[in-house]
Image (tube, rainbow, N blue to C red):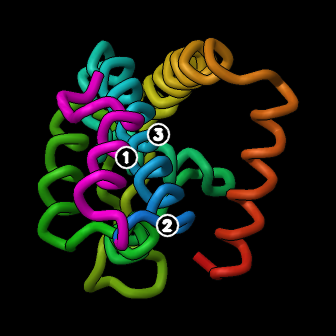
Amino acid sequence: MSKAYPMGRALDLMRQNWPEAVSVETELFLSMNRFSEILDKNCSKEVEAYGLTNGSFEVLVALRSQPENGEMSPSDLYQSLLMTSGGMTKILKQLEADGLVERIDHETDKRSKMVRLTPLGKSTVEKAMESVMAGDRRVIYQNLTKEEVQSLRNTLLEVVLKLGV
């Protein structure tokens, strides 16, 4: 898990030594940050078994979520995943070398290429997603009831949708 102090200890230290920085919003942010860190680490562990990083897994998930051929332009990919173009290029080169994606000509713009999921990429991301989801369930349901999970999901989803992100 995290090498950071357990959340309770971190908040106790803040309350004792910097009480003006402690608020509902601070506790919310720190809690979400820690929870995200736990899920990211779980994802890393699960996708590593498939030769993937979190970034390459996200690219494959984005492509798998597309209709029919599972293809997107590199710029659409990096914008949808909040990555830099340089970071995306590195990931795409590795995925292509591994046979998980292929670069194909754009139908209308011959100057650009599209990124398409290969059959191997599709099966790999589907298996990796099953593993990630199983790991997430273990982490979440060890600590929360189904009702708590549903409530947390509803609240976070509502916030993200309202923010438009």
At a point 36% along the width and 72% down the height, the residue shown is 20
At a point 31% along the width and 28% down the height, the residue shown is 44
First reached walking from the N terminus: tag 2 or tag 3: 2
Image vertical order of residue 93 relative to residue 41, above or below: below
At a point 38% along the width and 39% down the height, the residue shown is 57
Percent of width and height locating residue 160: 65, 69
Q: Nearer the viewer, residue 114 or 40?
A: 40
Q: Of the residues shown, which amino acid type is indicated by label 2? A: Ser
Q: Which mark is residue 23?
A: 2
Q: CA distance from mark 2 to mark 3?
A: 18 Å
Position of 159 with respect to 116 (left or right) is: right
Verify CB contact (< 8 Å) between mark 2 and mark 3.
Answer: no
Percent of width and height locating residue 95: 24, 41
- Badge 3 element: helix
User: What range is drawn magenta here?
Assistant: 1-20
Q: Of the residues shown, which amino acid type is indicated by label 1? A: Leu
Q: CA distance from mark 2 to mark 1?
A: 10 Å
**Quarter of the view holding residue 86:** bottom left
Q: What residue is disc 1 on? A: 11
First reached walking from the N terminus: tag 2 or tag 1: 1
